[in-house]
Every structure is written in C-alpha cells, then in structure tokens.
Amino acid sequence: MKKTYTLILSIFVCMGVYSQVDHDAFVGTWVYQRYDTVFKIKLQKGTKNTGTKGLFGGYYVSVDGITRDNYIMELPSV
C-alpha cells in the first residue's frame, strides 16, 4: 500500500510540475472577427512579484468600428 501511495503521489507531483511549463503555444495576439465585430486577445509571458511565471494580457472589442473596450497595452516583464 505504501508503494502504491508513493507512486500515485510522485505521478501527481510530476504532472503538477510539468503541466504548466510551456506557454509558448498561447503567446501572441489572437483575433476573432465576424461581420463588424472584432475581438482581440493579447497574451505574453511574465513573472509575478512572487517569482512564479505565467501568462498576462488584455483584450480589445470593437463593434461597428467603435471601440468598446481596449485593455491591450505593453505589459512589464514583472
């Protein structure tokens, strides 16, 4: 039973460590456009003050050429 518990614990630890490592597939600007509506999401890698790494970003919405929300800006690396 102890070996099974240790094996399961080590599998979960490895999954937690390696599951969030590669964010490169999501970094960039993603655009959805349909008729007169434009929705953009910009994601970039960064580091929190605590030292953990993650994705940060903003979004932009335009309807009929009128900007409704614009939260896309250059973010600092930390």
Image (cartoon, helix red, strand yellow):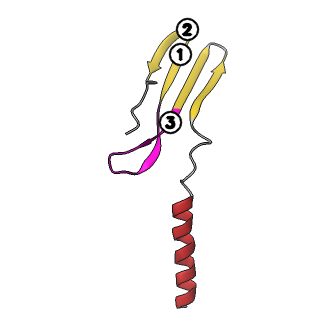
Q: Is mark 2 on a helix, strand or loop?
A: loop
Quarter of the image containing the C terminus?
top left
Q: Is mark 1 on a helix, strand or loop?
A: strand
Whether residues under marks 3 and 1 lie with C-beta atoms below 8 angstroms apart, the answer is no
**Apparent side of residue 33 relative to residue 51 in the rendered image (left or right):** right
Image quadrant of residue 14?
Answer: bottom right
The residue shown at (56%, 88%) is 3
- The image shows residue 60 at horizontal and vertical percentages of 50, 22
Type of amino acid at the residue the image marks with label 2: Gly
Quarter of the image containing the N terminus?
bottom right
The residue shown at (52%, 34%) is 43
Is-magenta flag for residue 52? yes
Type of amino acid at the residue the image marks with label 1: Ser
- Give the mark count: 3
Instruction: Write down the residue under mark 3.
Output: 44
The mark nearer the N terminus, 2 or 3, is: 3
- The image shows residue 53 at horizontal and vertical percentages of 44, 48
Q: Nearer the viewer, mark 2 or mark 3?
A: 3
Magenta-colored segment: predominant secondary structure: strand
**Apparent side of residue 11 relative to residue 67 in the rendered image (left or right):** right
The mark nearer the N terminus, 3 or 1, is: 3
Q: In this view, does 32 lie above or below 2?
A: above
Q: Which of marks 3 and 1 is in front?
A: 3
Q: State the mark number for residue 65.
A: 2
Is-magenta flag for residue 3? no
- The image shows residue 16 at horizontal and vertical percentages of 52, 63
Q: Which of 71 and 26 is in front in this view?
A: 26
In magenta, the rendered stretch is 43-57
- The image shows residue 65 at horizontal and vertical percentages of 55, 8
Considering every residue shown, the one lying at the far left of the view is 49
